Image (cartoon, coloured by chain):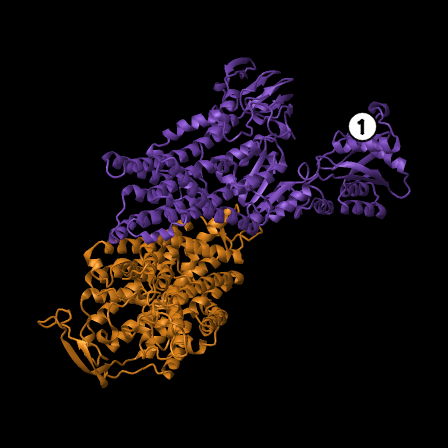
Chain colours: A purple, B orange
Amino acid sequence: MVRLGQSPGRPRKRAVWEGKIVWRAILDSFVKLDPRHMMGNPVMFVVEVGSVITTVLLFRGRGDFAFNLQITLWLWFTVLFANFAEAMAEGRGKAQADTLRKARSETIANREREDGEIEKIPSSKLRAGDVVVVSASELIPSDGEIIEGVASVDESAITGESAPVIREAGGDRSAVTGGTRVLSDQIRVKITSNPGETFLDRMIALVEGAERQKTPNEIALNILLAGLTIIFLLAVVTLQPFAIYSGSPQTVFVLVSLLVCLIPTTIGGLLSAIGIAGMDRLIQHNVLAMSGRAVEAAGDVDTLLLDKTGTITLGNRQAAEFIPAPGVSETEMADAAQLSSLADETPEGRSIVVLAKERYGLRGRELSSHEMEFVPFTAQTRMSGVNMNGNEIRKGAVDAITRYLANHGSEMPAEVQATVERIARGGGTPLVVAEKTRALGVIYLKDIVKGGMRERFDQLRAIGIKTVMITGDNPLTAAAIAREAGVDDFLAQATPKDKMDLIRREQAQGKLVAMTGDGTNDAPALAQADVGVAMNTGTQAAKEAGNMVDLDSNPTKLIEVVAIGKQLLMTRGSLTTFSIANDVAKYFAIIPAMFAGTFPVLNALNIMHLKTPQSAILSAVIFNAVIIIALIPLALRGVKYRPMSAAALLRRNLWVYGVGGIIVPFIGIKLIDMLITSIGLA
Amino acid sequence: MTFNGWLQIAIYLGLILAVTKPLGIFMTRVFNRERTFLDPVMRPVERLVYRLSGVDENHEMHWTEYAAAMLLFSAVSMLLLYLIQRIQLHLPFNPQKFAGVTPEHLAWNTAASFTTNTNWQAYAGETTMSYFTQMAGLAYHNFVSAATGIALAIAFIRGIARRQMKTIGNFWVDMVRSCLWVLLPFCVIGALLLVSQGVVQNLKPYDTTKLMEPQQVQHINADGKPAVDAKGQPVMDTVATQTIAQGPVASQEIIKEYGTNGGGFFNANSAHPFENPTPLTNYIQMFAIFAIGAGFTYTLGRMTGSQAHGWAVWAAMAVMFIAGVTVAYWAEARGNPLLQGVNQQVTALQPGGNMEGKEVRFGITDSTLFGTVTTDASCGAINSWFDSYMPLGGMIPLVNIMLSEVIFGGVGAGMYGVLIYVVLAVFIAGLMVGRTPEYLGKKIEAYDVKMAMLVALVFPLVILVFSGVASVHNFGTSGISNPGPHGLTQMLYAYVSGAGNNGSAFGGLTVNTPWYDTSIGFDMLLGRFFMIIPMLAIAGNLAQKKYVPPSLGTFPVTTPLFSALLIGVILIVGALTFFPALSLGPILEHLLLAAGKTF
């Protein structure tokens, strides 16, 4: 599957600092100073209030003006940097939305009136239920289902995939999306969305972040940060009476500086950027999440339901061997197998014809030459085959053929039964070929497991996620493939109801379940699963039931979605730890600076040997502000995620962001102190 | 520091380790209402209590009902104690004919103090309280306030252990069983042991004896000032007799430690020879202080089905205990650097180090160990005078309480206190491993974090606001005995001790004043009940949650890494909150002392 990066119309990976986005973000950071906006972020709101207070006091003009001015400016910068981080994250989404909007431009639709006449109306007038006709080279005016015809459609405006896809009436590939272009043929489409509710509209709203709501963990973290802010507010406000008691009262500028340095501004300033960037990362993987909650849930997934076909194995099974029944020659068996499959257009059927030709030199015969009547596969008989010259050849699963033989007063030979079981145990699919009363032999259809799957499942196991393979195969076959692919469990002969029951069962144990699906009969399970990723090629019902849509229609991507969900939470947690750990160094910078004037012995705490009290406080405030800017790339990219156990992950992140968070500001503040004292700012 | 000293500390920790499992199992059985060896004796008593009080022992309570019952019980008990104090003259067992406790703010302060398991004492026991008040008023609270703490911790553990249930137990049953099974039997045996060592237990009037050597002391005028004559020379009195206070001491002494109450029968608390006559009684008392707190870690593990988690919490507590006692022991044993030319070495004849304010029969080790233990737990019994410690030595008790007394901690209170930190630690750790945080299978969500932060807020709020106000007003600063950073420490310690429900005094602060009695009274009540209510809310919320089975993706709460993280969170929250105040108190004093300036 072609992945990222060539068509201009699709969301794609962006560099962190892109000129246009940066300029827009700078402007937005000032717009966001509006206190009504700031209130949503208690930590940064406190900083803004502090900035306003120092600004007012600055113009009252008492004390060391140069120092107070610098403090005030850096406090404002702290707020602006936080706004800038958020604006940067939003800006990336907005840029994507702009390109998508171009695809939404007004088109003229050919609507069928009740009397069958075609009328031309603007696409924005189309309602759900209207039927339109779209011909080659026309844009499909709105979302809908094909009710007649087949067409190749260029969906690159949505998916970025330039190769056209086939869409046809009936089945699971009937959905078309507004804004995509028909390349060949003509189709009749029943519109399924009202104006403003189309897939494209939703996609634009999503990437712009207009519908962004805080996710549960984000709310919890916000409460933690607000609580810490109040604790620090208490610590700083009550420090003044202690300072007065000690004969060393402090200026408001110094107290506000201490407060702003202590409250978790680093994570507070980056929190919403992290959330937006998480959604953005999904979009870069061509996955649309309908809510942030779904992304977060992806990080919590315990059980992954994966369809065997197309996800774990290559789409199609292939005939590998013909095993004749006792008393039947190999050639006779191969011939019968080929005859039964001549009209079988499934990939399996074709592979049987090919095997017969390659291994036994049997050429495909002209269909009409034998007065053959082909019997297609039906759900009732579960067999297909051919009738010719009074003879019948049938192929099908062993139970279906056993029944067939029984109907003709015969039974399945034990040898054939044994072969069937041997193949099934080995992970293959046995198809039995029979003519009326005689079983001719077994076709060995083999599943080809995709490369690299075992490694991926090992990774998932390492992070505690159980993989369950879903397949329609019988239990023996399923077990063998499950073993070969390395999944933890499998669900064989799965009906939609079995799938649903499995999800319910897992959820009853408190587990979170993720699955992919595309068919209409997947819809209930997609809705039930905590993370349901619908394939973009799938039906409208499936897309509506899931909480994510994969534009590439690549079921394996579920694994990436899980990683992105985890990364989102990890980035928040790690930066929170970093932010709090930073406070240690800031205390050692500011507390001696506040009181060393009165008690020179307190300089013993000035372990960074900062030049003067002013330079110490200023350096801490500057560090506190610039660290926000410095961490924007990390917030947008997310912290590095490696599949490993939670304990190992925590140990690593505690070293990097906890211990690192203690050490880094000591170095940073010292460097800033050396810089500003050398250029004479303090 | 001596090998003998370290050995005593090591044996002490060994004893605590040894009692953890048996006591933990015992408490689990008691509160799961399973059979114990005490049932034949206690069960009839228990049934009688329920019959008399009309309690349905099978009724289960929602957390709000549990909280309401607890608050109601505490309020009635507090009122009762206030009344007993005020009318003690008209009550029996008052051989010294003590009048009702005055002023009112002292009686209120004492009532609040004993109800909250603080046992802050703004009075001197032997000159204020009748035997009746000591027994029916104070010792009663020593039992029930401890039992309340145990009940609350059990309720919290149930909240973690239960799945999709609305209730967390029955307050009355938990409280009664705490008293009858957990507290009483140990106290009966412990009191007898203390008596065997010379702790008194009687209802006699005070004895008067002739001093072998009459003492000269300065006369105190009616206004409380030392008297001087016209020439400015002190007026001296000759004291030839001594009053020896008596009382039912042993029965009150053992619950004072075992229930981590700390209110001494006598003003000198465990430094008094009738309360704590020998090094053996000192050891028994220290053992009693940590016993239940340590046992609770095992109960936590057993009730929640994760024994390793219980031990991980135990280990975190033990590490912080060792760190505290090491610093305190070191600071006191090295002596006072300003006393040059004074021999502070350990010899066969002297304990060495800074012996000011310490009992000779305990020496440096047993004084600093006792001081650390009593403040790690929210006990507050003291056998030495923190006011006379070196600045860093005296900072350890202060810091121990500032960390919310979660190092084994008060009975029950230490357990639910540490669990709040566990919730916060698990929340941050959970995010760092990329999952919605879970604790023993329960998701930690916004509501839990909100309540945990409310608990975390109470401490800085009451301590910093009260001591901030006190430090800039005359009614506050007039109480301190030494100026400068030492005075700040005295004030800070008073509010820290009150809010932490510890009750130990730093010393040197005159606290029986309208301001201190009233403000510390509120300090204690807020510090206890404002923490308990959100704590119970978390318990109730956790109880009704679904259980999520742990996987490799779940951060394990059973490893040394978890213990380290828990210690980190406790230290960081405590340090970040109180570092500014500490730097102007004991840290500044230490630095000034090193520079030759004392207060």
Mark 1: which amino acid? Glu
In the rendered structure, the answer to whether residue B416 lies left or right of residue A103 reads left
Residue sitting at the far left: B230
Residue at (41%, 47%) from the top-left corner? A608
In the foreground, B311 or A491: B311
Q: Is residue A479 visible?
A: yes
Residue A123, percent across and down? Answer: 50, 18
Residue A479, percent across and down? Answer: 71, 47
Residue B435, percent across and down? Answer: 52, 46
Is B28 located above or below residue A615 in the figure? below
In the foreground, A553 or A255: A255
Q: Residues within 10 Å of mark 1 (few under 14, many from 20)?
A: some
User: Mark 1 = which residue?
Assistant: A373
Is B197 located above or below residue A484 in the figure? below
Q: Is mark 1 on a helix, strand or loop?
A: strand
Q: In which quarter of the image is the C terminus of chain B?
A: bottom left
Residue A297, percent across and down? Answer: 52, 42
Q: Can residue A290 be seen in this view?
A: no
In the foreground, A494 or B316: B316
Residue at (44%, 25%) from the top-left corner? A23
Q: In which quarter of the image is the N terminus of chain B?
A: bottom left
